Image (cartoon, rainbow, N blue to C red):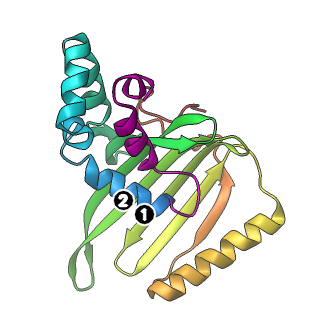
Amino acid sequence: MPVLEALEPGEAAFLQAGLPRCDSTFGLALAVFLAATARGAQDWLGGETSASLDELDGGALLEEVEEALEPRSRRSADGRLWRTLRIPVAAGDGAHSLLWGVAVEDGEAGDGVHTAVSFLLQMRLPALGAVQLLAAGDLRRLDVTLQTAEGMPASVLADLHADYAAAMADAGLTGQLTIGSVVGSWLDLDGTLSADTTL
């Protein structure tokens, strides 16, 4: 972003505004970012900005951005194959990154073949340290596991459980929210792609 701010201030501000943030807009902004970068960095940056970066150093920086936004396949210790992507997150003290992962498995249910999908988010937050969120969806059930390096107040835990139950009821889903420590449970899919701190 600093390079873009020097070359194309207006475009840099536009892209910065579109990055996911750790607030109530996170889910929508993440979906928009994933859609915008689905065809690679150059499509996300736009033709003029990509050309400016290309002229700067013969395309080396543009290639680095392209590689950073390229989804990769990684296997966790439990044998699951994850499609991972490193995503920039805008924060008050600068840009951070989170690791987004998706694992898809086919299985058998009473009515035939079904697909189970697992989602993974890993990042580091100032108040909680390393945070890992695992969500596993199977038919009409969604189980969520939230793990943090630092504990949370009882009032916050109660609010999280209440919000989760309300969201599941609104969506017509069943499931369970589990909150605990990330120590010993961190999925180290790739040291270079994991969140800012790996436990």
| Disc on res. 31 | 2
Question: Residue shown at 34%/78% (left/top)?
Answer: 139
Residue lying at the far front in this picture: please name it.
10
Q: x, y percentage for residue 161? A: 67, 73
Q: Which residue is mark 1?
A: 28
Residue 177's place in the image compared with 54, above or below, is below
The residue lying toward the viewer, choosing from 10 and 119, is: 10
Residue lying at the far right in this picture: please name it.
154
Helix, strand or loop for disc 1? helix
Residue 17 colored in magenta in the image? yes
* Residue 93 in sight: yes
Residue 60 lies in quadrant = top left
Identify the magenta region: 1-25
Residue 131's place in the image compared with 23, above or below, is above
Helix, strand or loop for disc 2? helix
* Residue 135 in sight: no
